[in-house]
């Protein structure tokens, strides 16, 4: 007889999770309702065959909640709330409408937390770590002000803009990364598999070789003999460096060093300025005051130097200084951004001016990225061409010398 798993609630609101055997699903529903329970969810139990298939599917394609799922959840929940649905009913509708198992599970977990008396701002971080302090703080402000649907709309807009910026950066770096990887693989194959075939021949002849073939053979012998150890040492050094960068001191050193690089530094400054302005505008538009907004911005910024900037600005604003003066003291933000923020404070339109700053530097990021790639791609190609030319000349020299040895 088939088995059905169900969730139901007693009259006092206590949740029940159990299973029941019945001929079909309508019979199971009737039996649950006859027991005085309010049915919340019911689904057929898995047979051994379907269980193995589900496990195989989970191993081959694990279901995890992604940031794109959070963005979709935010936008759809905002739309349902703006349509006039209560929060619990909106979550139930979203659970029925979505085709993604991760979102259905998220909606179900949030509903369960809400039934236990938690607020939405408390329930969301319990369900997933992807709900960061910015998200939860905005939800808390929206619940307190009674404008949760508007807050969710601002959050969805912020997430979409942030995702597009990240996708633009990743897409722009794909082609140079592929070039570098293929070049390194080709060089390793030549040095490890091709060059050693000539090494024994010249070792037996005892004739001196030009410096270029000797250099090539030396690299080949180094990789053939110590390649595994060098790879292990490189992995260990990378692990130790990443561990150091995860510490507070190491992260600050890395972020400060990245900002001082010739081409990458100005681009990172523009990115952090746009993110700071966009996040602060989103928080202020949702009804949050300036000081709590600056404290949340400090937790959102990925660069520790700019996070310290937001912390210092919050301390100065707490002492009575204006935001533009507090930000200018660190000398990290561009002068144009400070001037625009100052104009916004003077006119009383700080939030729209922060949006303008974010738009201005988002456009500047794309321009700088295009310029950086226009310089990076030819540089990589020239380096690859130089290495390939060196290897080809060395191989030709080896072939000519091997021909002399044979004749």
Image (cartoon, grey):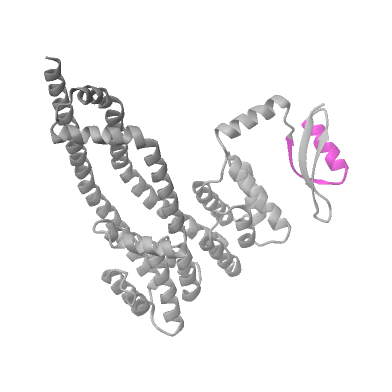
Quadrant of the rendered image containing residue 103: top right
Whether residue 254 is visible to the viewer of this picture, yes or no, is yes
Check the image and report above or below for 281 versus 63.
below
Whether residue 278 is visible to the viewer of this picture, yes or no, is no
Measuring from the top left, give residue 316's x and y in whole percent: 42, 81
At x 53%, y 60%, the residue is 135
Measuring from the top left, give residue 195's x and y in whole percent: 25, 27
**291 and 10: which is toward the camera:** 291
Q: Is residue 334 left or right of residue 401?
A: right
Image quadrant occupied by the C terminus? top left
Measuring from the top left, give residue 353's x and y in whole percent: 35, 69
Check the image and report above or below for 287 versus 259.
below
At x 26%, y 22%, the residue is 197
Q: How many marks?
A: 0
Measuring from the top left, give residue 50's x and y in whole percent: 68, 27
Image quadrant occupied by the N terminus? top right
At x 48%, y 75%, the residue is 291
Q: Which residues are magenta?
A: 25-43
Q: Tell whether position 36 is magenta.
A: yes
Q: Is residue 390 left or right of residue 152?
A: left
Q: Is residue 347 left or right of residue 151?
A: left
Check the image and report above or below for 70 versus 190.
below
Farthest top residue in view: 407
Q: Tell whether position 224 is magenta.
A: no
Farthest right residue in view: 35
At x 32%, y 35%, the residue is 223
**259 and 132: which is toward the camera:** 259
Q: Is residue 407 left or right of residue 178?
A: left
């Amino acid at each position: 007889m088939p088995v059905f798993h169900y969730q139901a609630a007693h009259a006092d609101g206590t949740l029940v999770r159990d299973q029941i055997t019945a001929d079909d699903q309508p019979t199971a529903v009737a039996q649950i309702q006859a027991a005085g329970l309010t049915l919340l969810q019911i689904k057929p139990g898995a047979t051994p065959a379907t269980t193995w298939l589900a496990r195989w599917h989970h191993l081959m394609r694990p279901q995890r909640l992604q940031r794109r799922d959070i963005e979709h959840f935010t936008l759809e929940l905002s739309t349902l709330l703006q349509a006039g649905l209560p929060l619990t009913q909106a979550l139930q509708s979203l659970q029925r409408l979505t085709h993604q198992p991760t979102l259905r599970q998220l909606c179900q977990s949030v509903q369960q937390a809400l039934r236990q008396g938690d607020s939405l701002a408390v329930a969301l971080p319990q369900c997933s770590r992807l709900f960061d302090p910015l998200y939860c703080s905005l939800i808390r402000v929206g619940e307190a002000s009674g404008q949760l649907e508007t807050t969710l709309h601002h959050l969805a807009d912020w997430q979409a803009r942030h995702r597009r910026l990240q996708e633009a950066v990743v897409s722009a770096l794909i082609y140079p990364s592929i070039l570098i990887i293929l070049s390194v693989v080709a060089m390793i194959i030549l040095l490890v598999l091709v060059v050693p075939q000539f090494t024994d021949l010249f070792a037996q002849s005892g004739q001196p070789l030009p410096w270029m073939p000797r250099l090539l053979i030396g690299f080949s012998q180094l990789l053939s003999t110590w390649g595994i150890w060098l790879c292990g040492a490189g992995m260990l050094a990378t692990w130790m460096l990443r561990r150091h960068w995860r510490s507070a001191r190491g992260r600050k050193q890395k972020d400060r060093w990245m900002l001082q690089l010739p081409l990458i530094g100005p681009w990172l400054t523009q990115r952090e300025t746009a993110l700071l302005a966009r996040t602060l505008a989103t928080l202020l538009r949702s009804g949050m005051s300036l000081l709590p907004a600056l404290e949340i911005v400090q937790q959102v910024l990925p660069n520790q130097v700019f996070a310290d900037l937001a912390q210092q600005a919050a301390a100065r604003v707490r002492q009575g200084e204006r935001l533009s003066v507090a930000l200018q003291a660190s000398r990290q933000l561009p002068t144009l951004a400070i001037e625009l923020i100052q104009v916004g404070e003077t006119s009383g339109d700080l939030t729209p001016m922060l949006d303008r700053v974010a738009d201005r530097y988002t456009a500047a990021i794309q321009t700088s990225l295009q310029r950086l790639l226009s310089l990076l791609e030819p540089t990589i190609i020239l380096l690859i061409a130089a290495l390939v030319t060196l290897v080809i000349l060395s191989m030709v020299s080896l072939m000519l010398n091997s021909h002399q040895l044979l004749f």
